[in-house]
Image (cartoon, grey):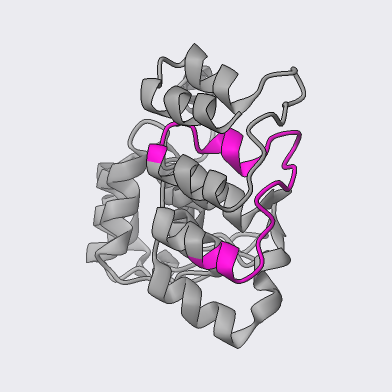
Amino acid sequence: KDGAETEIIERLFERGAVKDVFILADLGYAEELDDYLEQHPEHLNVQDEKGATPLYHAAHNLHPNTIELLLQKGADVNLATEEGSTPIAIATDHIWDHRGTDTVDLLMRKNPTLDFFTACQLGKTDRVQALLKEKTGLVQEHKGGWSSLYLTCGNGHAETAALLIEQGANVNERNAGYTPLHNAVSHPGVVKLLLDHGADPKATDANGRTPEDLAHERGLNKAVSLLKQAV
């Protein structure tokens, strides 16, 4: 992503640092990457020491132009890192950052295979249901300390959230001090769903704030109204 680190890297280049395929993808240097791959086409799907491809690096740093270039050249959209993360998974984790939505939309055009948590975050209910049939215990698993229901609610996917609840997801489970209801305040439909299934409107986060407090701070009047009625 853009920022002070990019300026530091530019200075290193000025002093002779080598631009390899991963660095070019990380920084979104599409034109230079195009030239590089013309000379080294065998590096299109090369993986670094952690299993990340150039496409993964570009997706992690949300560079749509670079991703488009790599996909046009035939980059494998499903190659995963050693930890099992794919380009669409890492882009989805950053979907609310600048260029996040564009990056996810671009990758989705290639119909990537979605893991359980990515499918939840994107509201792909059919995919979530299929994966739960393969392994029902998935609903109890976590990604980086976050439950599937928490992530789904934060992205506003009521249908997918309803499926997870039906499959046994805990509507009051704490995620780093927050409940799914805290994470859902931007999405009134999800707030109502959670309340209808027993979510505690009085639950407080690590700073003592209820979901209503968060909704009020953000000027989310519909959520405030729903939460007031539930108390």
Q: Position of residue 129 (x, y in %)?
A: 48, 77
Q: Quadrant of residue 81?
A: bottom right
Q: Position of residue 75 (x, y in %)?
A: 35, 68
Q: Residue 183: within the magenta?
A: yes
Q: Quadrant of residue 169?
A: bottom right
Q: How many marks?
A: 0
Q: Position of residue 10 (x, y in %)?
A: 46, 23
Q: Residue 2: within the magenta?
A: no
Can residue 60 be seen here? The reply is: no
**Would residue 34 be found to the left or right of residue 199 on screen?**
left
**Would residue 73 be found to the left or right of residue 27 on screen?**
left
Relative to residue 214, is residue 65 depicted above or below?
below
- Look at 74% across and 18% down and name the residue there: 208
- In the image, the segment drawn in magenta is 163-188
- Look at 57% across and 69% down and name the residue there: 166
Can residue 142 be seen here? The reply is: yes
Question: The N terminus appears in which quarter of the rendering?
Answer: top left
Question: The C terminus appears in which quarter of the rendering?
Answer: top right
- Look at 59% across and 87% down and name the residue there: 134
Q: Position of residue 170 (x, y in %)?
A: 69, 56
Relative to residue 108, is residue 64 depicted above or below?
above
Closest to the observer: 181 or 41? 181
**Would residue 108 be found to the left or right of residue 91 on screen?**
left
Magenta segment, prevailing SS (helix, strand or loop): loop
Residue sitting at the far bottom: 134
- Look at 47% across and 20% down and name the residue there: 3
Closest to the observer: 78 or 120? 120
Closest to the observer: 164 or 5? 164
